[in-house]
Image (spheres, helix red, strand yellow):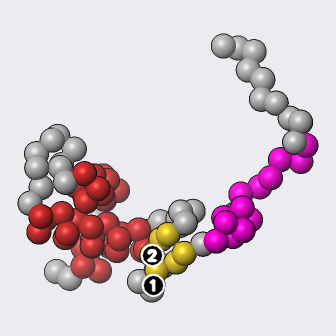
Amino acid sequence: MDIIQLVDNMSEEMYLRLKCAAETGKWPEGTVVAKEQQLSALQITMAYQSKHLNSDQTLSISPKGEMIIKTKRELRSDFPTAQDTNDIARFSDI
């Protein structure tokens, strides 16, 4: 099975486990991941992100496998701005 087939059939739960292994070097239950496993987990995680996630991160991977780097201006345009800067969030049912 190649990496594309793997990513196409992978569940979100497995993606989150692999992401944890790639980021921390440990499985979610705390078992240490071998260096080769960590590198494989990173590759699979990046492939999954490019195929299934629309990322709002500064750095991400496109569906074509290319690196996308957004500027501050591009990131600001992705998020709506408040109409009135004097707005305050109030929570009365605390």
Rendered view: 33 above or below 47: above
76, 14: nearer the viewer: 76
First-in-chain label (1 vs 2):
2
Circle 1 Cα neighbour tier, 10 Å, few/some/many (<14 / 14–19 / ≥20): few
- The local secondary structure at tag 1 comes to loop
Query: What type is the residue that disc 2 sits on?
Result: Ile
Look at mark 1 in the image and give the residue it sits on.
66
Residue 69, above or below 15:
below
Image quadrant in which the C terminus is located:
top right
Mark identifier at residue 26: none
Visible residue check, residue 90: yes
| Residue at point 17%, 40% (across, down) | 29
Magenta region, residue range? 71-84
Q: Secondary structure at mark 2?
A: strand
Residue 15: x and y in percent read 30, 59
Q: Residue at x 20, y 82 (%)?
A: 2
Q: Is residue 13 left or right of residue 39?
A: right
Q: Dot 2 corresponds to which residue?
A: 61
Residue at image x 91%, y 43%? 84
Q: Judge whether residue 74 is colored magenta.
A: yes
Q: Amino acid at mark 1?
A: Glu
- Circle 1/circle 2 CB separation < 8 Å: yes
Q: Residues within 10 Å of mark 2 (few under 14, many from 20)?
A: many
> Is 6 left or right of 37, judged from the image as shown?
right
